[in-house]
């Protein structure tokens, strides 16, 4: 559980708007931007392009909220590059400009605890794997100080909601600005709730 903790640090190669960029890190955004950091299982699959293209279509809305979007899978940077250069009608994600992190060594997915499969040792002492070492559909909302404030992890077949990710950014920013907590289904512009008489810290410690 990463809620309330600093997001794990990493450096990895990423593809950003068609360019391969080494030593990419989320630390570049600390103090400057909120981050929606999401994992997906594989390039060139079925559900994944709908999510990646959906986040691209919503980039302006995230930008209005001072928020950047970063994707990550256990594919290589070359796979990311090829996928971003493949047309949509051919199963690609051409036009996606936000960073796609290449986690081919599985280290980032392990740090965020979204790696499916399991490393093991067989009876002969050889390394083996149970299942497939790819990422679940994890999503993390990270505030400007680098702390994880929201996370959700879906199984492989279950796509996420871009609208819900935006709603969570709105809820976090409303709380930071007004100190009010956001009830079930809260939407930007709707009435929120004042915390208890114990204060916000008392409310959050329950």
Image: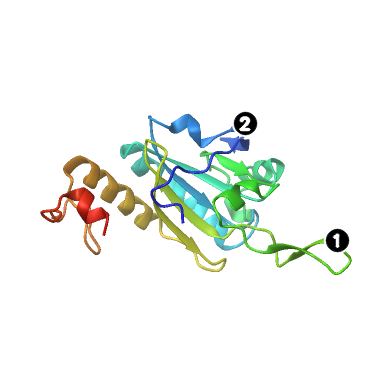
Q: Is residue 123 left or right of residue 84?
A: right
* Residue 142 position (above or below residue 183): above
Q: Is residue 128 left or right of residue 41?
A: right
Task: Examine the image and state in which quarter residue 81 appears.
Answer: top right
* Residue 189 position (above or below residue 129): above
Secondary structure found at label 2: strand
- What x and y, as percent, mark residue 160? 45, 61
- Single out the residue that lies furthest toward the right: 124
User: Residue at the location (64% across, 56% down)?
Assistant: 42
- What x and y, as percent, mark residue 58? 40, 47
Mark 2 crowdedness (10 Å alpha carbons): few <14, some 14-19, many ≥20: few
CA separation in Å, label 1 and label 2: 32 Å
Q: Earlier in the sequence, mark 1 or mark 2?
A: 2
* Residue 107 position (above or below residue 51): above
The label on residue 4 is none
- What x and y, as percent, mark residue 182? 22, 56
| Mark 1 in CB contact with mark 2 (< 8 angstroms) | no
> Circle 1 sits on which residue?
126
User: Residue at the location (26% across, 44% down)?
Assistant: 173
Q: Is residue 148 left or right of residue 129?
A: left
The label on residue 23 is 2
Task: Examine the image and state in which quarter residue 102 appears.
Answer: top right
Secondary structure found at label 1: loop
- What x and y, as percent, mark residue 195? 15, 54
Q: Nearer the viewer, residue 94 or 171?
A: 171
Mark 1 crowdedness (10 Å alpha carbons): few <14, some 14-19, many ≥20: few
User: Residue at the location (34% across, 50% down)?
Assistant: 166
């Amino acid at each position: 559980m990463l809620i309330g903790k600093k997001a794990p640090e990493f450096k990895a190669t990423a593809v950003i708007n068609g360019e391969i960029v080494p030593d990419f890190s989320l630390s570049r955004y600390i103090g400057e931007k909120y981050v929606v950091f999401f994992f997906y299982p594989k390039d060139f699959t079925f559900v994944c392009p709908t999510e990646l293209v959906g986040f691209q279509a919503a980039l302006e809305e995230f930008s209005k909220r001072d928020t950047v979007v970063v994707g990550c899978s256990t594919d290589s940077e070359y796979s990311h590059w090829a996928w971003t250069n493949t047309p949509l009608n051919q199963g690609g994600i051409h036009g996606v400009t936000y960073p796609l992190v290449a986690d081919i060594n599985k280290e980032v997915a392990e740090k965020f605890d979204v790696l499916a499969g399991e490393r093991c040792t067989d009876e002969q002492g050889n390394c083996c794997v149970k299942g497939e070492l790819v990422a679940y559909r994890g999503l993390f909302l990270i505030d400007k100080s680098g702390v994880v404030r929201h996370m959700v992890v879906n199984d492989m077949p279950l796509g996420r909601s871009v609208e819900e990710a935006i709603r969570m950014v709105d809820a976090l920013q409303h709380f930071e600005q007004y100190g009010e907590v956001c009830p079930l289904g809260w939407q930007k512009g709707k009435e929120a709730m004042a915390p208890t008489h114990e204060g916000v810290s008392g409310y959050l410690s329950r």
